[in-house]
Amino acid sequence: MAESRRGLGGAERALFMLALVPYLLDRGEVSLDEIAEHFDVSRDLVLRTVELLPVTGIPGDANAYLDNDLFEIDYEALDEGMVVLTRNIVIDETPRFSAREAAALIAGLQYLSALPENADSSSLTALAAKLARGTTDRPGEVGVAPRAPDAALGVIRAAVAAGTRITFDYLNARGVAESRLVDPLRLESNDEDWYLRAWCSTREGVRTFRLDRMGDVRATRAPIEHRLADVTLPDTLFQASPDDLEVVIELPETAMTLLTDYNPHSTTPSSTPGRVMTTVRLAHLHGLKRLVAGLGGLATVLEPADARRAVADWAAAGVAQYAED
């Protein structure tokens, strides 16, 4: 709203100044024209507002609005049409992220940027840059290596968009590959794992498939027979199947909420106080390894024996890698 089109009232001017100060702190040095364009106001209004900053501040300890309690600007830069704050009031006292906190957040943003749906996201890049500037110290360089995208992901995305069927070989709980013909409905991700929600013609019902257990994914020209609006998708990614493995796990009772997606059976008190036993259903032992790892040492696999052995072997292999280093 340019001032020539609609004047700003007192309250609006105050709001503009409140928004202007953090903007200047974030940008460092910015021209009057850039500010006017960013806030959609006239250049003249920006100039008059900036000229008010040196008489704006806080009462200070002496309650007298002394010089050090007021904002200060670079007047030589202002003569050249640039705005630079040389003294900041109050806002510098707000808590800032430590370098370690900012590094952790930036690593998380890099992980999100690596997901296919966030490819080339300028918003995530801009947010990471702001986090780096708004810390008590410069955060260390961090990097998250993205996992190579699954070639099947592109085929499935195209089929979902086109409304056509796909075929693939799927590794079942027994480790046997089965041929499936499905109507792809929706792709979902859980951490780095991708899942396809689809109507399975082989099973005649809605099923969830993990992409890393799908092979030879091929698109067809046949249109899907079941659309997303025609079926009801379960609220959780994991649904029970007659082929599922039943695994008995012992863990603290307070950690039971971490198993919600696995539809655990009722609990039985363990001989260890505060711990319970429950049964979860999993489509494959690979999923059990990830479940146990995600619980951070809280869970113990009790039975069946092959499940205990699979988790033990997987943990031993991980320890061995550290020993080699």
Image: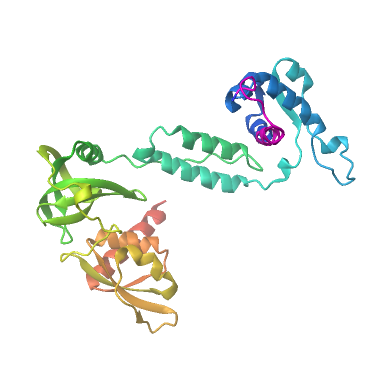
Residue 15 magenta: yes
Name the side, left or right, on which 27 lies relative to 282: right
Q: Percent from the top left, x then y, of residue 220?
A: 11, 38
- Residue drawn where x is 86% and y is 39% of the image: 65
Give the colour scheme shown.
rainbow
Is there any visible trace of residue 51 in the rendered image? yes
The image quadrant that residue 174 belongs to is bottom left
Q: Is residue 264 above or below residue 122?
A: below
Does residue 235 sit above or below 42 in this rendering?
below
Closest to the observer, 33 or 284 = 33
Residue 280: % across, % down: 28, 69
Q: Position of residue 159 (x, y in %)?
A: 19, 38
Image quarter where the N terminus lies is top right
Residue 145, above or below 170:
above
Q: Is residue 73 visible?
A: no
Residue nearest the observer in this picture, 165 or 112: 165
Q: On the picture, is 160 further left or further right than 312?
A: left
Q: Residue at x 85, y 44 (%)?
A: 60
The image shows residue 286 at horizontal and vertical percentages of 26, 59
Residue 164 image-quadrant placement: top left
How many numbered discs? Answer: 0
Q: Vertically, is 248 above or below 180?
A: below
Q: Nearest the camera: 273 or 57? A: 57
Towards the viewer: 310 or 33? 33
Q: Going by the picture, which residue comes out furthest to the top? A: 80
Q: Is residue 184 left or right of residue 192?
A: left
Residue at 23 percent across and 56 percent down: it is: 232
- Relative horizontal placement of residue 180, taking residue 256 as reference (left or right): left
Question: To which quarter of the image does residue 218 belong?
Answer: top left
Residue for point 31% across, 77% down = 266
Q: What's drawn in magenta, residue-wise?
A: 2-19
In the rendered image, residue 99 lying in the magenta stretch gets the answer no
